[in-house]
Amino acid sequence: MACLAAALCFGGAACKEQNDSTKGAAADNTARNKVDRDSNTKTPLDQSESSPDIKITAEIRREIMKAENMSTNAQNSKIITDKGVVTLRGPVNSSAEKDKIGALASNVAGVVRVDNQLEIKTP
């Protein structure tokens, strides 16, 4: 509902409500993203441009989106494929989501290995 209010916000009362409810919310991921600066850490920029790798990444994303009860975090996880090796990164809400995404990735044709680096979100 908040998403809809934010999308339709043109400065009226709903806008003020939306702004008040998100006031003070920390949106800074600088500390968490420091790991992406390490040259050994895979990022979306490391996604191979080969047709088979792009197809693998797209199929994994489709499977995640089709799966029931996946959080927005899970649906937005990073999927990086290079020579059939899939790296999964980002926060998920539970160990069940982490395991489910890993299994979905492993079952996609052409996947050689899955490096499941998904992190379980802490409150």
Image: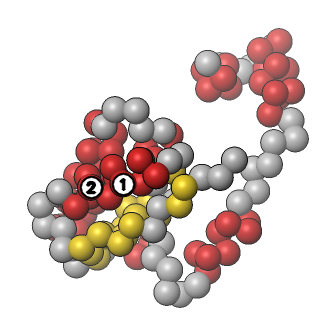
Per the image, the residue denoted by label 1 is 99
Of residues 114 and 77, the one nearer the viewer is: 114
Q: Is residue 62 left or right of residue 33?
A: left
Q: Residue 56: horizontal and vertical position, in percent? A: 21, 61
On screen, residue 75 above or below 18: below
Q: Is residue 110 left or right of residue 84?
A: left
Which amino acid, by three-letter code, is at mark 2?
Ala
Disc 2 vs disc 1: Cβ atoms closer than 8 Å? yes
Per the image, the residue denoted by label 2 is 103
Disc 2 is placed on an element classified as helix
Q: Residue at x 87, y 41 (%)?
A: 24
On screen, residue 11 above or below 30: above
Q: Residue at x 86, y 27 (%)?
A: 20
Q: Residue at x 58, y 84 (%)?
A: 38
The Cα–Cα distance between marks 2 and 1, rounded to whole angstroms, is 6 Å
On screen, residue 43 above or below 37: above
Q: Residue at x 35, y 72 (%)?
A: 115
Question: Is residue 7 something one can see in this rendering?
Answer: no
Which corner quadrant holds the N terminus? top right
Q: Residue 2: horizontal and vertical position, in percent? A: 66, 23
Disc 1 is placed on an element classified as helix
Q: Quadrant of residue 19?
A: top right
Q: Quadrant of residue 36?
A: bottom right
Of residues 66 and 19, the one nearer the viewer is: 66
Q: Residue lying at the far front in this picture: please name it.
A: 95
Give the tally of numbered discs: 2
Q: Residue 73: horizontal and vertical position, in percent? A: 52, 46
Which amino acid, by three-letter code, is at mark 1?
Asp
Question: Is residue 82 something one can see in this rendering?
Answer: yes
Q: Residue 86: horizontal and vertical position, in percent? A: 30, 69
Q: Is residue 100 left or right of residue 20?
A: left
Crowding at mark 1 (Cα within 10 Å: few <14, some 14-19, many 20+) = few
